[in-house]
Image (cartoon, rainbow, N blue to C red):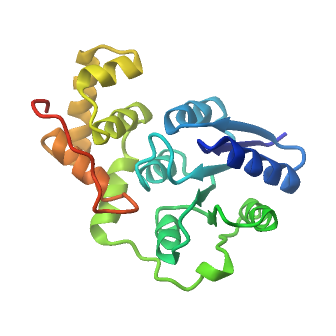
Amino acid sequence: MPDILIADDHPLFRDALQRAVLTALPQARVHSADSVHTLLGLIEQFPDAELLLLDLHMPGARGYSALAHIRGQYPGLPTIVVSGHEEAQVARRALGHGASAYIPKSSSGESIVAAIRAVLDGDVWLPPALLGAPGELRPDEAAAAAQIAALTPQQFRVMTMIAEGLLNKQIAWELGVSEATVKAHMTAIMRKLGVNNRTQVALLASQLAVDQGSMPALPDGEG
């Protein structure tokens, strides 16, 4: 039986996606996550999953960063992005980052089923109202996505927590590791991203935000 992954932190919409999956693929086994960190564990548990439905806004997602990371680490996993955004440019950026489809959360159940079937058949899908918008990523956004894609799953977890403004000791507690381990991850992350401190890590991550003008304040004194 095919394994399908759903990542969405809203239980009602998660249930709606599961119903759509089972309509499109009745024999599927559906596995759900309510955060990106939980999702990364699911992907490791089900490496041969046939499809991922990924909420653009959920804990640990940071805009397109989770999509870019997952597409880099698991290029064989087709991904459908779901989001409350209705703008065509948001949808086209998702495709630019490697999504196979984009589903606004206002979509009907029939549209969600159609998107799932199209992607399982190897096609790319957008709702008719969002077709035709420019799909090229800005060079700096494409470069940031490629760098984030090179992170390991644990490094990506640490990066998102840095971007959320967490201190090293908070990250260590969240991940159940020592602060020395977090600092080692920090060193590797900064090397892969080509930056020198945690502020620059967060700035690079912010390039993949849907609203690129928003970034949380960072604590002082940690690098």
Residue 5, position as x, y percentages in the image = 68, 42
Above or below, 174 against 163 in this view is above
Residue 9 figure quarter:
top right
Q: Is residue 223 visible in this depiction of the protein?
A: yes
Q: Is residue 76 visible in this depiction of the protein?
A: no
Above or below, 152 against 183 in this view is below
Residue 99, position as x, y percentages in the image = 56, 61
Of residues 100 and 62, the one nearer the viewer is 62
Quarter of the picture containing the N terminus is top right
Residue 184 figure quarter:
top left
Residue 68, position as x, y percentages in the image = 45, 53
Quarter of the picture containing the C terminus is top left
Residue 50, position as x, y percentages in the image = 71, 48
Direction bottom: furthest residue: 132
Q: Image point 76% across, 66% down: which residue?
A: 108
Q: Decide if residue 134 is on the left or right side of residue 27.
A: left
Above or below, 23 against 173 in this view is below
Q: Image point 9% across, 30% down: which residue?
A: 221
Direction left: furthest residue: 221
Q: Decide if residue 178 is on the left or right side of residue 21.
A: left
Above or below, 21 against 153 in this view is below
